[in-house]
Amino acid sequence: MRPPAAGSWVGDLVSRVIAMDSGAPVRSAARQLLARRLRVLRTARGWSQEVLAQLSCLHRTYINSVERARRNIGIDNLEKLAQAFGMTVGDLCATGHNNHFDFTSQEGRHG
């Protein structure tokens, strides 16, 4: 039997089951989308994680863990990051697809 195609919902499910069996944490789609969004915004501005940490009054290792989707970020810290970028929390969480996290799309599922 062939393994499920990459990018399919079955492939995603199999990957999550394997991750759970291996002891690796399963990260939520929202966390993965936010991680990607922060990294894109930060690098587009030419900022290091250290610069973003200073601008948001957060620690560099915290920024790193959020960008790797290892941290379940609180609303207060989300607001600090949004302010560092000069935007609202809503704008920070916009993905470009209807301006919100879309959990029904393939991208939303696979982050």
Image (tube, rainbow, N blue to C red):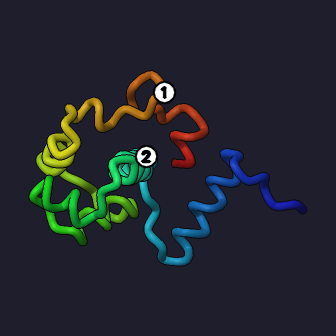
Q: Residue furthest front?
A: 46
Q: Quadrant of the N terminus?
A: bottom right
The residue closer to the viewer here, 31 or 51, is 51
Q: Which residue position holds label 2? A: 33
Q: Residue furthest right?
A: 1
Residue 63 in percent (x, y) is at: 26, 62
Q: Relative to residue 69, is residue 12 drawn left or right?
A: right
- Residue 95 or residue 87, whichever sits in front: 87
Residue 22 tag number: none
Q: Residues within 10 Å of mark 1 (few under 14, many from 20)?
A: few
Q: What's the amino acid at mark 2?
A: Leu
| Location of residue 105 with respect to 81 vertically, above or below | above
Q: Gap in Å between the C-alphas at discs 1 and 2?
A: 12 Å
Q: How many tags in the picture? A: 2
Q: Residue at x 17, y 46 (%)?
A: 84
Nearest the camera: 26 or 78? 78
SS at circle 1? loop
**Mark 2 surroundings: few (<14), some (14-19) or many (≥20) residues within 10 A:** many
Report the residue at 20% width, 32% height from top.
88
- Report which quarter residue 58 is drawn in: bottom left
The amino acid type found where label 1 is placed reads: His
For mark 2, give the secondary structure.
Answer: helix
Query: In the image, residue 83 lies at what x, y percent?
Result: 15, 41
Are the two marked residues, 1 and 2, in contact with CB atoms closer than 8 angstroms? no
* Residue 42 x/y as whole percent: 33, 51
Residue 37, picture quadrant: top left
45 or 52: nearer the eye? Answer: 45
**Residue 11 pos. (x, y %):** 69, 54
Instruction: Decide which of tag 1 and tag 2 comes sooner along the chain.
Output: 2
At horizontal 14% and vertical 54% (from top left) the residue drawn is: 55
Please indicate whether residue 107 sits to the left or right of residue 10 in the image.
left
Give the labeled residue for mark 1.
97
